[in-house]
Structures are given as structure tokens and as C-alpha cells.
Amino acid sequence: MTRSNILVIMVDQLNGTLFPDGPADWLHAPHIKALAARSTRFANTYTASPLCAPARASFMSGQLPSRTGVYDNAAEFVSSIPTFAHHLRRAGYRTCLSGKMHFVGPDQLHGFEERLTTDIYPADFGWTPDYRKPGERIDWWYHNMGSVTGAGVAEITNQMEYDDEVAFNATQKLYDLSRGADDRPWCLTVSFTHPHDPYVARRKYWDLYNDCTHLDPAVPPIPYAEQDPHSQRLLDACDRDAFDITDEDVRRSRQAYFANISYLDDKVGEILGVLKDTRQQAIVVFVSDHGDMLGGRGMWFKMSFFEGSARVPLMIASPDMMPGLVMAPVSTLDVTPTLCDLAGVSMAEVMPWTDGQSLRALGQGGERTEPVAMEYAAEGSQAPLVGLRAGKWKYVRCALDPDQLFDLEADPNELQNLAPVEKHQETLSKLRDLSEKMWDLDKFDLDVRQSQARRWVVYEALRNGSYYPWDYQPLQKASERYMRNHMDLNILEESKRFPRGE
């Protein structure tokens, strides 16, 4: 059978509430809007875990963090867990990654045959949280509010340098694939770090939002004493009291964030432009790993199950799926089964241990009623949190905290916790019972603590004496590039041209 090429475009920390049906009308994102118009758009997509490394391991494997063991940003993603790159490569695909995937551990490929860039974040255990020390901040790598107070304009940053490189390598790879030297179908994953904080943008994108009417969050800051316990822990972890956050800081941070969506839009336009110019056809997936609270409730970044943090955009442009809006809750866990389904690749051997399901049928008019699951067990927590989105309801449970229950239709800003309300006890009981069947929180907590303790020992040991980093080192085979004396110039010039003979 002829298998479709696949292009996965992943962005980092993009708030899904800004994508009610593709990008919101007021966002300057013409290329992403054009992609949305030909895509199946999933309005209620949730991350498996609202933090980079656990979210990405789950996205790539279709398994929750409690299965992968990737609980936080320094937990090893073990090589024995199949990813969509493994499944597709096993079926004959050429698999390639340009950009971030925040793999931790010595395996920096996880099924990708080729990786074009290094990662932007470290691959070792240095960012391991420690449940044995509740409330302790690890200042040199924990988020703080400096990203907010430092918001503004710059023409180059660490992250811009990275994403410029990611886009360049991706477009060059698409040109290379068009030359036909390898007749296998391909899956190219292009993964950017924007619009992740720090909130700094180039002037030309910043100026697009000078008159934006969305620079103030819909939900203003909630006093610390009125926040739920997990939100209080997150505010403490981000060292909120050490910073004086002004209304102008909030507006500037949001303006930079929106500007960086437009920056990404240009990158998406470049990539899709090369795909079109080289006459290559591909299924296109656009997704984020998690969201950003963007000052709503006085909260920033991710690590929470509130909509701004946990909800992400997901769009799939495929000839096997109809363009249109799907309102049923889905998960980033579903991406791997969906890609395999669209490619005609069976996951039967591992499906019993997979938490996601294919979305192909939803893009063909099908329905879905199963709840969507989320987990969090990283910095700012002191015990694992689990969550369910079931229909209009969102339920959150943690051994340390009171239950939370929200009706997202009546209360989209999640301002009223209905768990203590008498008339909602039946709904609460059903979701709690389902949660207890899905998760043993005592065992989950023990597994996380064991993982953390082991990694602290290993990290401190490996930092003594000579240190060999796990960070991916891209190999440039210079002797196989451009023109070299073992190449026939006539063959070379023709083979490197697309289209040929025009």
C-alpha cells in the first residue's frame, strides 16, 4: 500500500483557549488559520500532563506518565517504550526530528532515524524535584516571575536562535526529501520552543498587538488565601512574593506571548510553503505540549489542570478526515494512535498498555464519550494530582487536597468548585469512583518518590569526576555535503535539483 507522508508541527506552551476553532480571529496568524481551514479541529484537547517532558513522552507514546515513568522534566524516558516514530519506522517510514522533544536520558532519538538539532533543554537528571523536601524551591531551575517582569522586545534571544535553527533545518530537510533519493514515505516532526516564556518578542511581531484588546486576562488575580492548595503551591514554587507584578507587566507579557504566536505563524508558513513548492503531499498535525495560564487568576506558566494550562490546540489535515470542528474532549495521548491509524500501521501488540485512541473516526463524523485523563507529579506538587474531563465536567483529585469539580459549560473560567455542593454529589461520586478505578494514588506517590530518590543519587554521582553529557550532538557529515571528489559532478547537480529538467 502507498503510505502518506506525515508532517507534525509541535509548539510549546500554547494556550488552547486561544484556539476555539483554529486561532482566535484577533490573532495575526494567517498561515495557521489557512491550515485550520483544511483541518479537523479539536476544540477541547487536553495534555496528558501540563509540563514539557512528561507531556511530550505521553504525546509520543500514547501513555500517561504513570506508565512511562516520565513524571517531571528530569525523568528518564526509557528506550523500551515504543513511540510513533518507532511504529512508523518499523513500517518502513523515514523518521526525522528537527527541534525540541525534551528527552531525558541517554536515548535522544526514541525511534527517530535522524535528528537535525540538539535539544534546547538538558537531558540529564539535574531538574529532579524532591518530594522529601516539600515547599523547597530549587532556585537555579524552577520557574520564577522574572519572565513576567522582564517581558519586552528583543531581536534575538536564546529561544529565537533555537527556533530559527529548527525552522531552517526543517525546510532544508523538506527540500532534501523532495529530491527522491529515498523512496520511503517520511514522517518529519518539527518542534518549536515558542511561545514558551520568557515573554520576549521581535519588534515586528510585538507591534502587531499594540492595540490588542486582549492584553488583560479574562480572570483577574485571585488573592492567595482564596486560591486552591495546588495553586498556592505553584505560586510559592514560582517565588511569587519576591516579585512585584504590575498590570503593565501582565500586559507586556501577554503582548509578547501573542507576538510569538505570530512569529511561529511565519515559521509554519515557511515550512508549508516549501512543502507546496516541492509538490509533496503530507498529513499535517499541529499540536502543543501544554498551555500557559498567562496571568489568569494571577497564575503563570503551566503545571495546573485549569484550562489555560491543560488545554492545547490540536488540528489534523488529512484526506481521511473532514475539515471541521470537533467539540468532544480528546487528548494528546490520542496523537500516536491516530498517526498510526492514518498511516495504516497496527499498534495491536502494545494497545493494551496504551491510554490513547485514534481520532480518525471523529474526523469522519464519529462520536466519543470516554473521559480524558491527566496526571501531574512534578515541581509545585507534593503528591500526584489526577484529573478527568468527562463531557462538560472536569474533576481533579489529590491525596493532599479537597476534590475539585467544575461545570465547564456553565463556568468556563472555573471559578466555582462544585465538589462541596450538595446537588452535585452524584456526579462527584461517579467521577471519584472512576478515578479510584484508574489510579491508586498511594502507589503512584510511592513510584514517584522512588524515581526521584534514585535520580538524585545518579545525578550527584555522575557530576563527580569526568562528566559525559547525554545531550544530543548533531552530526554534520561534511564530506557528504555539497561537492566532494568522490562524487560525479554531473550526477550530483542533477540529483540535487527539484524539479528536474525545468
Image (tube, rainbow, N blue to C red):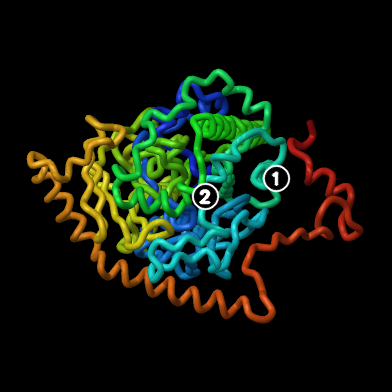
Task: Write down the residue under mark 2.
Answer: 144
Residue 326 percent coordinates (x, y): 33, 33
From the viewer's perspective, is 164 left or right of 310?
right
Decide if residue 319 is on the left or right side of residue 415.
Answer: right
The quadrant in which the C terminus is found is top right
Residue 385: name its quadrant: bottom left
Residue lying at 63% horizontally and 28% vertically, measured from the top left: 205
Q: Are marks 2 and 1 in contact (CB under 8 Å)?
A: no
Q: Quadrant of residue 194?
A: top right
For residue 7, say whether it is visible: no
**Of the pair 14 and 350, the residue shown nearer to us:** 14
Q: Label 2 crowding class (10 Å Cα cut-off): few <14, some 14-19, many 20+?
A: many
Please, what secondary structure does the residue beneath circle 2 have?
loop
Three-letter amino acid code of the residue under disc 1: Glu
Neighbour tally class for label 1: few under 14, some 14-19, many 20 plus, Cα within 10 Å: few
Q: Residue at x 50, y 33 (%)?
A: 246
Between discs 2 and 1, the one toward the N terminus: 2
Asked if 138 appears above or below 252 in the picture, the reply is: below
Residue at x 43%, y 71% (from the top left corner): 452
Q: Residue at x 37, y 68 (%)?
A: 448
The answer to whether 246 appears left or right of 64 in the picture is right
Q: Report x, y in % for residue 460.
A: 56, 77
Q: Which residue is mark 1?
A: 161
Task: State the separation of the CA atoms marked 2 and 1.
Answer: 22 Å
The residue lying furthest to the top in this view is: 211
Residue situated in front as seen by the camera: 246 or 124: 246
